[in-house]
Image (tube, rainbow, N blue to C red):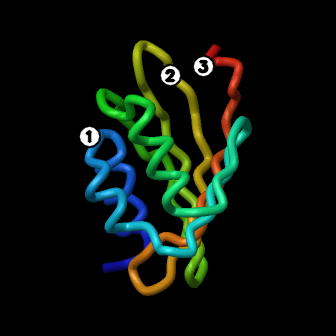
């Protein structure tokens, strides 16, 4: 699987609310940050997904970029009538995501 395929598969699983598939795609040394949160462990990230509804979201990929084990996806994200553009950085090793960083306008989620 290419690194872009790993990241797109992650987004598909996230959009469907398939936490078990998300868990398979992220590494044990996983780190995450976005404009409002930061998780330094896989377990804390998965716990946040279990505590918040991730289902019923959708995305439309506009651009993909890959450089070695780094991937950047730019996509339109839609959930509960909210639409926003997201830049999503991933670091992938051995078909597992070990780092994610999102950039978006968090004011649209208030």
Q: Quadrant of the rendered structure where residue 55 is?
A: top left
Find disc 2 in the rendering and name its residue: 83
User: In the image, residue 33 lies at what x, y percent?
Assistant: 68, 51
Name the image quarter holding the N terminus. Answer: bottom left
Please tell me which residue is depicted at 70% across the width and 29% down the height of the picture: 105
Residue 36 vertical position relative to residue 107 in the rendered view, above or below = below
Q: Tell me: 10 left or right of 100.
A: left
For residue 16, which numbered disc appears in the image?
1
First in sequence, mark 1 or 2: give its number: 1
Find disc 3 in the rendering and name its residue: 109
First in sequence, mark 2 or 3: give its number: 2
Which of the pair 36/103 is nearer the observer?
A: 36
Residue 83 vertical position relative to residue 72 in the rendered view, above or below = above
Mark 1, other Cα within 10 Å: few <14 / some 14–19 / many ≥20: some
Q: How many marks?
A: 3
User: In the image, residue 30 lies at what x, y percent?
Assistant: 56, 68
Q: Tell me: 106 left or right of 22.
A: right
């Amino acid at each position: 699987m290419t690194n872009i395929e790993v990241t797109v598969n992650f987004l598909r699983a996230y959009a469907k609310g398939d936490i078990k598939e998300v868990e398979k795609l992220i590494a044990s040394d996983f780190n995450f940050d976005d404009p409002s949160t930061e998780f330094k462990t896989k377990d804390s990230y998965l716990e946040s997904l279990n505590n918040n509804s991730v289902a019923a979201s959708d995305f439309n990929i506009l651009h993909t970029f890959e450089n070695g084990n780094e991937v950047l996806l730019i996509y339109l994200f839609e959930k509960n009538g909210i639409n926003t553009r997201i830049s999503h950085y991933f670091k992938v090793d051995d078909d597992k995501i070990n780092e994610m960083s999102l950039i978006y306008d968090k004011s649209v989620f208030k």
